[in-house]
Image: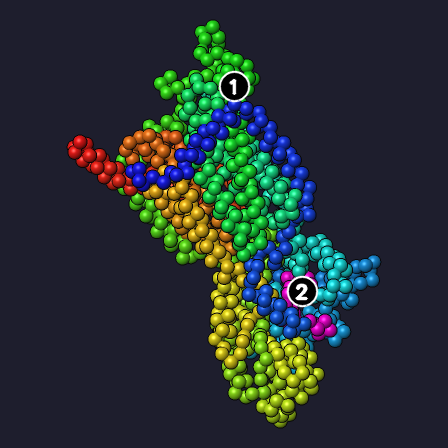
Amino acid sequence: MGCRRTDCLAKPLSGLFEKLGSLVGSCPFFFFIIPVLLSAALSGGFIFLKDREDNDLERQFTPFKGPSKATRAFVRENFPYNHSMFSADRLYDMGNFASLIAVSTGSSNVLANPAFEEIIRLNNKILDISVDNGRLGFNELGAKVNGKCVSNVILKLVSSNETYPASITYPVHRDRSSSVFLGSVLGGVITNASGSVISARAIKLFYYLENQERLAEVSKLWLKGFKALLSDERDSKYTEVSYYTSKSKQEEIDSHTTDGFPLFLITYASAITFSVISCLRMDNVRNKVWVAFFGVFSSGLAVLSSFGLLLYIGVPFVITVANSPFLILGIGLNNMFIMVSDWQHTNVKDLVPKRMAHTYKEAIMSITITAVTDVLKFFIGVKSDFPSVQSFCLYTSVSIIFCYIYTITFFGAFLALNGSREASNRHWLTCMKIPSDNSDNHSAMYNICCVGGDFDKNTGAEKKQPASNFFKDYYGPFLIKPWVKGVVIFLYLIYLAVSIFGCFHLQQGIDLNDLAADESHVTRFNMKDRQHFSDYGPSVMVIVGEEFPYWDETKRCQLQACIEDFRQLQFIDEDSHTSWLDSYLVYGRERHLNLDRKDVFLENLSHFFDLFPFLKQDVNLTGDAIYASRFFIQTVDIANASKEIEMLHVLKTTAGRCSVASLSVYNQEFIFMDQYDVVVSSTIKNVGVITAVMLVVSLLLIPDPICSLWVTCSIGSVTAGVTGFMALWNVSLDSISMIIFTVCIGFTVDFSAHMSYAFVSSKKQSPDDKAVDALSNLGYPILQGALSTILGVSVLATSEFHTFRTFFKLFFLVMFIGMVHGLAFIPVFLTSITSCSHKDESKDSDMKASKL
């Protein structure tokens, strides 16, 4: 066995921790006061919290080098805005706008009176909003076409008795020489056989503002006025109204960045309560109430110090960082329960420094394994493609470092101070010396409340709690029975099968509206939008990104064939498209122009653009060459993230198949859809790196390579379980859940590493006895840590924010599945695997003995 042990670092580190424990036990006040003073000094960083908040949706929640950002830069350079010819389809960013959705009550027609009269009344009130002392209204601030504000055409169409209802066609309405796309403004439409609108359930109105820097402040004021007006507007008996502005998502997220702190305080209160209850003792000297309290307090100091330090040096504080304290709480509680467990195994008659030396030698080694892997894991996450993930990982990694330091200093010092109180046989509450034996001269109440200090006379250690005895006397011996091992392995196979099944049904994609509160106007608008306007998705630009001879008939036909390939896709409306080239060819045929000649093609473009000024924005004509151009196609049935993933993938694939020209696709929403290509690969990469790091660290610190391998395998096992069950629990894989998912994998290391280290460190001979011994020592601490953390984060299940509820779901899955691995699967597998090697070693020993 000696040749297979890999404890080259474990032994010297154990000796170092033993000396540190003795030092902490000798002068605990120093180690207790310094962390408190340091935390007080670093907490001053919170005065910069407002300045450090950064929840910019694009900057924080999209990949650094998303391909759509490069495409947008190309569009911005080659197709700059023409502010006098506004076109919503031609926006390369979100723009500046307000929107409302009016839904008719019951099943009535929103386009018929009296519902439509309500909408007209509301529209007039919106157009009357003014800012800058009444000098600027929508007529001055609105986006313009030929000097006139862009209006909601649908209102004009319906208001005309001559037009409605028989003459409005859906989704495209022909109005004289132009056409109007109504798919994005009418929802729940019923048409007749000829495509004319009979009725509609919902109508969406847009109010676009000038998107110029000089009007930025007054436009923002107008949007605030719009929001104030609509927030005061009550639903009538005819219509229900939801509203939204281009600033809504950002404002909603910015206003709730620190909303996690109250939940954090509730969580800590719950954790303290549970920890105190679980550490209660009937013995008035051995009671660990204050130990539990200061164990939780140690985690709070770690968060205070780490956050304050990073806020001092200017690290952005993103809304995702608000999840970090809950993780630190879980780590701190695990550390506390393990240290208390090892302290209870020491001889109560020994001096405090000696007891602390023994505690540190056994407990800190196990804590170090998990701390090192967690810190390395999160420092790796700092290299993520998502800035929000980077901020989270940086805050969390520094918090873990402080949590580790404060565990071995602040908490260890208080454990030593508490040990000095116990050594003097003082009461846990009053600190008065009390007798250790019951007295017949006092009442029963006195003996219950004022007597303590008993211990196990056989071992010299504190008496074990009933829960610890349960693991030693009942659960451990039961688990090692052969038939029980078989049942556990069978249950593990079922667990693995269900997990793999769930993995194949995992959904991807983040809906940024999920960052808003459930009852916010953003969420209500989004729900109405999904319900009534999901038939038609975004309009997509198809961009020719190079100089192209459009007058060359052969190449032109090939390019048109490529564009036609887009129109034939299943989620593209073949009849709704915009092509300057098709329109120009029709123009040429009507005038009998030979557009196959370069000079004729270029000379007549200016006349064509005079008649169709909107199409001029789709061509970058410089000199006698067209360096870029774009076409538009209309998507349909993009109702969820899975459809978005499929759409983006197929569009890019179709663009890549065109050999005649370099094509690319773009819509402003693609900036956020780029995450789909990154999230899965990033998650796989993170889990792979974490697994490799864990293998290396465990090989160096756990004195048995087989156990190290099992700890590493447990990462994959729990990862599969969490992934599968999160899919079955309707949790999508996105940039936010990826953060939480990666975070939670660390806890799989904690439980498995603690149990494996206890297993190989046991002085027992047989594998079954080692397993029982490990469960006896760590079964209850693991159970305490898991249940206290689950109880603490359970408050997040009631949150109105999707982010916190997702954190609860994943944290619950990891803590529960990790606990089951630590208390059942890992012990069974370790005994099963090491039994063979143990038998082989026994045979070798017998052979050597016989030879001698």
Residue placed most toward the observer, 88 or 309: 309
Residue 445 in view of the camera: no
Residue type at tag 1: Arg
Seen in the image, is 781 located left or right of residue 534? left
Q: Residue furthest front?
A: 852
Seen in the image, is 768 located left or right of residue 254? left
Secondary structure of the residue carrying numbered label 1: helix
Q: Residue at x 36, y 33 (%)?
A: 761
Q: Residue at x 59, y 40 (%)?
A: 306
| 27 drawn magenta | no
Q: CA distance from mark 2 to mark 1?
A: 67 Å
Say which quadrant the N terminus sits in.
Answer: top left
Secondary structure of the residue carrying numbered label 2: loop
Where does the magenta region start and end? 81-102
How many labels were placed on the picture? 2
- Residue 404, compared with residue 346, is above or below; it is below
Q: Which residue is mark 2?
A: 95
Label placed on residue 421: 1
- Residue 62, compared with residue 351, is above or below; it is below
Residue 140 in view of the camera: yes
If you read the primary sequence from the N terminus, does the residue marked by circle 2 or circle 1 appear first? 2
Residue type at tag 2: Gly
Q: Position of residue 465 (x, y in %)?
A: 41, 25
Could you tell me if the residues under marks 2 and 1 are in contact, i.e. CB atoms within 8 Å?
no
Tell which tag, 2 or 1, sits nearer the viewer: 1
10 Å crowding of disc 1: few (<14), some (14-19), many (20+): some
